[in-house]
Amino acid sequence: MAYLELCDVDFSYSNGFEALHHVSMRFEMGEAVAIIGQNGAGKTTVVKLMNGLLKPSRGQVLVDGVTTKQQRTSQVAAKVGYVFQNPDDQIFQDTIGKEIAYGLVKKKVEKSAVKAKVAAAARLCGLEDEMETHPYDLPFSRRKFVTIASALVMDPKVLILDEPTAGQDAPSTRLLADIIQGVMASGKTVITITHDMEFVTKEFSRGIVMAKKHVLMDAPIAEIFENDEVLEEAHLKRPYIAQLARSYGIRGVLTDEELLRAM
Amino acid sequence: MVAISLEHVTYRYPLGTGDALDDISFHIGQGEVYALIGGNGSGKTTVCNIIRGFIPQFYKGTLTGSVMVNDKPVSEYDDAELTQIVGYSFQNPFTQMSGVKDNVREEIGYALENLGLPREDIGRRVDAMIELLDLQEMADQNPLELSGGQRQRVAIAAVLVTDPQIVILDEPTSQLDPQSTEDIFNIIKLLKNQGKTIVLVEHKIDLVAEYCDYALLLEEGRVAMGGPIRDVLTDPKVMDHGGQLPQVARFFIDRNTKLGLCDPIPLTVQEAVEFKTGRGN
């Protein structure tokens, strides 16, 4: 059975705006899945349904076999961790150490365990030397890692990252990739919303393309980038190397190595 | 004409332990699209704040060296005058809405209201921006209800509406999907055709390669590399200084190395095709 499942879900915001219509998707443990599509396609709404921040207007969201409607957001969030698109929607402590520790302290985890867990999460996110720093003394791009550490420290089964690549430089993008690989390697699932098609190609095997409130395609990444119709409808672009390959009449190529061999 | 010049600019933030910028010099000619690139924390936004005069006006600290806009020291402008010459779109799209306007149309017109323009002029110019940035659908929405990507486009409209000669765009596409990102770069091209000078902070290096004339690569507050876009972005040394190469350039550099070739390095997909046809293969 899938660990996380959306069954024919509709969602409308309180102002009547319908953000999702007939959406179904399922996730097993140990997957890395990228959700891609235009701004406004419904990507953030979908992931907020997964961790119980939003409850469906119609249909079911099942986490570990239980509908989110019957659980408090905090219960769902313990299993499905969500890192907001805007770190400032989430950060409220005055040092990075306290910010990362907050969830554990609230859960009344023993002090020495908190310290060890926080140190481990901070190290994964490149923040080990910033524990006493005020979160707002770091640039926006690194504040995002503070929120990722805060989610990692709670050890959820599923980790959701909402546009973690936005505004990141090359070393930070590599750090993100390492974090995602690490979480996957421990048998957990990572679901990531991103606009960076190179990142999608390198780090994910499965993609979900969303457009206009619904799922357009759910398939291996390589298949998505071969489907002209879907790419056009979702206003997506192929990675540059795939574009280059196609300009030479070579199809089915996503990486440098593949293109080098094919040329 | 030189639109912007920095000579031996060094700056330390108040309470800063080291120099945020260390002996930075560069010139931007009128009508050029100039990219500031480099890792997070390398000093790109600080440079923008200095050009716009926010440093040292709002952020104190120690600033030395010469900063000129249109051949006049920035310190000799009054702020209203500089605002009209230099438009600035901030990095964080979540904090740039004024918070005092309840719809997108008024948000975009806010600066013009402050300049005391007649109502009908404001309406006309706001409509033109709504059209340019394709904001029709959200024109009557509250700016604070918009997504990150939508706010980013509204913020750019609110800057361009005053028709500044110099436009600073600090990561204008960080929250945008690929299509909207390309739309912003097309607007940059349009602004260039209107003779405007553009300073662009951007991580999407493949698009920088396609649309910018010059690049300055900063590393830890110093100029690591700088020059015409082709010279900078076909040089593998970029990667030693916290920068990135465009995918296409990187591919051909690797290919030359692996196959022992010295083919010219294209910057974009289109150039790669042109080079190939040009070589007659």
Image (spheres, coloured by chain):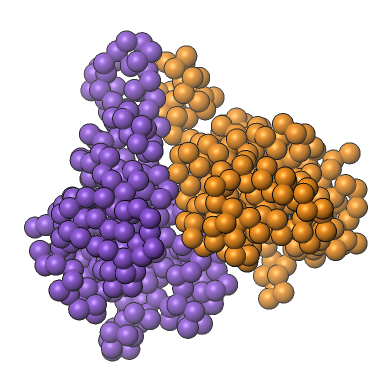
Chain colours: A orange, B purple
Q: Position of residue A169 (x, y in %)?
A: 45, 44
Percent across and percent down for residue A123 are: 61, 42
Number of numbered callouts drawn: 0
Q: Nearer the viewer, residue B129 or B142?
A: B142
Q: Nearer the viewer, residue A223 or B30?
A: B30
Quarter holding residue B243 = top left
Q: Is residue B240 left or right of residue A13?
A: left
Q: Residue at x 81, y 50 (%)?
A: A79
Judged from this view, the residue extending furthest toward the top is: B260
The quarter of the displayed image where residue A41 is located: bottom right
Quadrant in which residue B232 is drawn: top left
With respect to residue B26, does A198 lie above or below?
Answer: above
Pinpoint residue B158: horizontal percent, then vertical percent: 37, 72
Q: Is B219 left, or right, of B97 in this rendering? A: left
| Residue closer to the observer: A34 or B231 | B231
Q: Is residue A43 visible in this depiction of the protein?
A: no
Position of the N terminus of chain A by quadrant: top right
Q: Residue at x 88, y 47 (%)?
A: A64
The residue shown at (50%, 52%) is A141
| Residue A112 in view of the camera | yes
User: What residue do we see at 45% from left, 77% from top?
Assistant: B98
Estimate the x, y position of residue B155 in percent, counting from the top left. Answer: 41, 68
Q: Please determine whether, in this image, residue A44 is positioned above or below residue A225.
A: below
> What is the quadrant of the C terminus of chain A in the image?
top left
